[in-house]
Image (cartoon, rainbow, N blue to C red):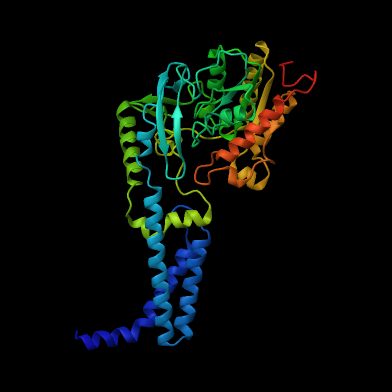
Amino acid sequence: MTTESFKSLIRKYYRLAFLVCGGLLLTVGWGIDIGGPGRGPTQHLIGATGAFLILVIAFGSGRLILRVLLILGASYCTLIGCELVVRIARRPPRALWQQYHRLYRSDPVVGYTLTPLWQGQFNDGYAQGKITVNSLGQRDDEPSTGSKHRILLLGDSFTFGALLDQSDTIDKQIERLSTDIDAYNLGVPGYGLPAIIETLKRCDLPATEAFYLFYNNDLQNDDLLPDNGKFVVDGHLVPTKKPDGTLYTEAEIREKIAGAIEEQESKRTIVDLQLFLLPHIRQLMNGKRFYDSQNFHIRRSSLGGDRRYSEENVKRAISHTQELGRLSSARGMPFYVLIIPTLEEVRTREYSLPTAQYLKGIENQNMTVVPLIQSLAEKDYFSHDGHFTPSGALVAAEAIYRKLKPRGNEKIGWTGK
């Protein structure tokens, strides 16, 4: 085929070719959801571009078509450049499995605890900070020996301070509100109520109040197991069972760990095929989740774990919460339940059914509830992860502090009666 005949062919069929391109853009924009962060402004823009291109091809002149294509091409190349800049800026210095390696150690009862005296830096490309574990295996300073008003904070990753620097955790923000208070952080990521109860039993520090920070995932099947359904292998926190309930063999778990590490390392690459779908730009525009939360260990979704809920789980959680309250009461500590809503619950200003059932159950037991759902906003959560930002931790800290302010001789907190 000669050059002239090739040009003639292009001129003859270019409208058809561009019509196909417009159809593809329309499909990518409005027909399917690809690339991770969900259908948002960017995909609507792509869909609208496809529709506009079809209209231009159908009714426009050749010169107009060329100009439109040049504008679209230049705009797309600019977005790819922005995507590269964001990828470079948000590229963590190390893969997350390295950042949290050996943060946990095995425990025969609760499956795992924090490793005493562990120190590290985290940076997931969105949040960064320092983690320091004291000699007792808690993310806090060494317990004070003075006459400060000490309170105990019990819970999971929200209490621990996931994605928060050591200075921005809930306990540290309470202490900034009052220098007379020692808010002691007993939170451990991934802990459910049985492990939280065991944590309180093991803590022999004198304190005046106890706060349990409830989050929706405390009602999941694996979080209601004594060992949280997890154990430590080579410094990595992993589930004990597959999704079908059978136990992992050692070879299987090591293979899964290797695969999860490889996946995390691949997310640090700057250039890949996802680049052309602009996932980081879309995540910024959509404000939706693109990266799955690593939850400070090898990503559980790639390994298994049982995250199902049931009404029986709610009943068990209420019973465990009563036991937590009785343990607190036996030590003379008023007991509070701080209800931390999920990001979606904050958006709708309505609790999910499992949380609503749990809340009703503990209120029927006359427990003192501290709700946060009306005080929090979307900005108080990391959109890519769902944990508190420093401002969210401050909202929780202020709610706790208000419960601690002197109110004459009024008896506060649940006393187990």
What residue lies at 41% left-to-right and 60% top-to-bottom? 82
Residue in the image at 44% along x and 84% along y: 64
Image position, residue 396 (x, y; %): 63, 34
The quarter of the rendered structure image containing the N terminus is bottom left
| Quarter containing the C terminus | top right
Residue 96 lies in what quarter of the image?
top left
Relative to 221, say whether 334 is above or below: above
Report if residue 340 is visible in the image: no
Drawn side of residue 384 relative to residue 322, left or right: left
Residue 223 in sight from this viewpoint? yes
Q: Nearer the viewer, residue 128 or 256?
A: 128
The percent position of residue 173, horizontal first and vertical second, equals 59, 31
Work out whether residue 317 or residue 174 is closer to the camera in this orientation and state it.
174
Q: Position of residue 376 (x, y in %)?
A: 65, 41
Give the residue at x 33% y 57%: 273
Instruction: Please state if 58 lies on the left or on the right of 204 as rendered.
Output: left
The part of the image, by quadrant, that contains residue 5 is: bottom left
